Image: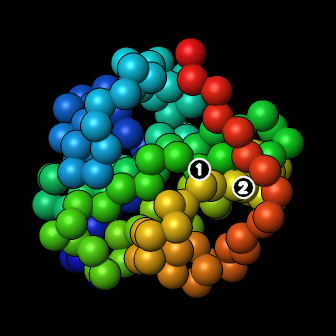
Amino acid sequence: MIQPMIVRSATAGDIPAMLALWRQFWKPQPYEANLPMKIEREPDLVVVAEDGGRIVGTVIGGSDLWWAWIYRVAVDRECHQKGVGTALLKEILQRFKARGIHGADLIVSPGNEPMLALVRKLGGREHADRRYSIGF
């Protein structure tokens, strides 16, 4: 694990670093404009990992208070295999549990072997049900 890594709720001041990290993996999306509102409304569900003052990982949770979703798990490529992803996922799952939620879904690209391994390590199972995404 990176020392001294801090896992904490994100603040509005973290947004530029979060977006820069996401550019390693994803092209800009219109919904990213809602990040300040997400941090303001549900600060406990926007989590970052920080190492030496630098954002090295993110995870965002969403919940309807019955079930939860995990979004935007990202770990700086320089920090892969150092426990950042594990720490982030354990933290968001603990935060869901504190809300009385005992399950979460996430979508992992079939070719993302490191993420698949991490999710399986934490007890994740693949389901055969259909999932749909509607963009607007």
Eyeballing the image, is 116 above or below 131?
below
How crowded pointer 1 is (Cα within 10 Å; few <14, some 14-19, many 20+) is rated as: some
The residue that mark 2 highlights is 104
**Percent position (x, y) of residue 38?**
50, 25
User: Label 2: few (<14), some or many (≥20) within 10 Å?
Assistant: some
- Looking at marks 1 and 2 on the same chain, the residue that comes earlier in the sequence is marked by 1
Determine which quarter of the picture holds residue 102. bottom right
- Which structural element holds mark 1? strand
Name the residue rendered at 45%, 28% in the picture.
39
Most extreme residue toward the right is 66
- Residue 4 position in % (x across, y down): 23, 71
* Coloring basis for residues: rainbow
Q: Nearer the viewer, residue 18 or 131?
A: 131
Q: Are marks 1 and 2 in contact (CB under 8 Å)?
A: yes
User: With 14 as the anchor, is 63 left or right in this view?
Assistant: right
x%, y% of residue 123?
A: 69, 79
**Which three-letter amino acid code belongs to the residue tagged 1?**
Ile
Tag shown at residue 70 = 1
Q: Quadrant of the N terminus?
A: bottom left
Is residue 133 depicted above or below 110 in this figure?
Answer: above
